[in-house]
Amino acid sequence: MDPSKTLASFLGGEVHVVTGDITKQDVDAIVNAANSTLLGGGGVDGAIHAKGGPKILEACRELRRTRFPRGLPIGEAVLTTGGQLPARHVIHTVGPITAIGKEPDASMLAACYRNSLALAAEHGLRSIAFPAVSTGAYGYPPERAAPVVSETIESVLSAGSPVEQVRLVFFNENDARTFLKHHKFTITD
């Protein structure tokens, strides 16, 4: 059972801002805020690997062996099975790291969302759930991420993406409220 709570929706109901556990989202794909090794880590990455089971790690190891021997580059996205998750697939993307006192890399953060949505569309997926990529341990300021994320999603969906539902999943309500205060969606519901 997914106890997610919807706080707001945008773009005619195509985008929902929710609080909850991303590993419990019943969508075609959830996005993993992965590290470049693709071999698991902390936070969202660790939770997805733990709850999704060994098939996700097996698929990631195969990607490392065949396509990304040096690791997944920042901003790129790859698709694996969802293993034991409600979502059939996991889209792994590596967000930019923002060092204290440094300017966050908006173009790389936008690439994470744009490439994840493109990959979902390429595979005929209609629903996708994103965590707040790069805003945790990677240090991207959440209030600076919100406009980048919202503008990127709106741009992709407005261009005719076949993706019909995007969930922005925040683990706690304070993070969701920060997003809602700083987003740049032009069409609200």
Image (cartoon, grey):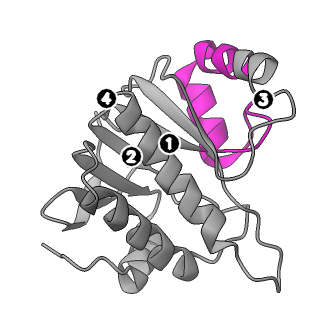
Q: Are marks 3 and 2 in contact (CB under 8 Å)?
A: no
Quadrant including the N terminus: top left
In the rendered image, the vertical position of residue 176 relative to residue 180, given as above or below:
above
Label 3 or label 2, whichever comes before in sequence order: 3
Q: Are marks 1 and 2 in contact (CB under 8 Å)?
A: yes
Label 4 or label 3, whichever comes before in sequence order: 3
Q: Residues within 10 Å of mark 1 (few under 14, many from 20)?
A: many
Q: CA distance from mark 2 to mark 4?
A: 15 Å
Secondary structure of the residue carrying tag 3 is loop
Q: Which residues are magenta?
A: 33-61
Label 1 or label 2, whichever comes before in sequence order: 1
Q: Which residue is mark 3?
A: 68
Mark closer to the observer (2, 4): 4
Q: CA distance from mark 4 to mark 1?
A: 15 Å
Question: What count of labels does the image hold?
Answer: 4
- Report which quarter residue 144 is drawn in: bottom right
Q: Which residue is mark 2?
A: 129
Locate residue 144 relative to residue 70 in the image: left or right.
left
Secondary structure of the residue carrying tag 1 is strand
| Residue displayed at 81% across by 82% down | 102
Q: Which residue is mark 4?
A: 124
Picture coordinates of residue 107 (x, y %)?
62, 69
User: From where the camera sits, is residue 13 visible?
Assistant: yes
Mark closer to the observer (3, 2): 3
Mark closer to the observer (4, 1): 4
Picture coordinates of residue 80 (x, y %)?
55, 23
Q: Residues within 10 Å of mark 3 (few under 14, many from 20)?
A: some
Tell me the amino acid under the disc marked 1.
Val
Q: Which residue is mark 1?
A: 31
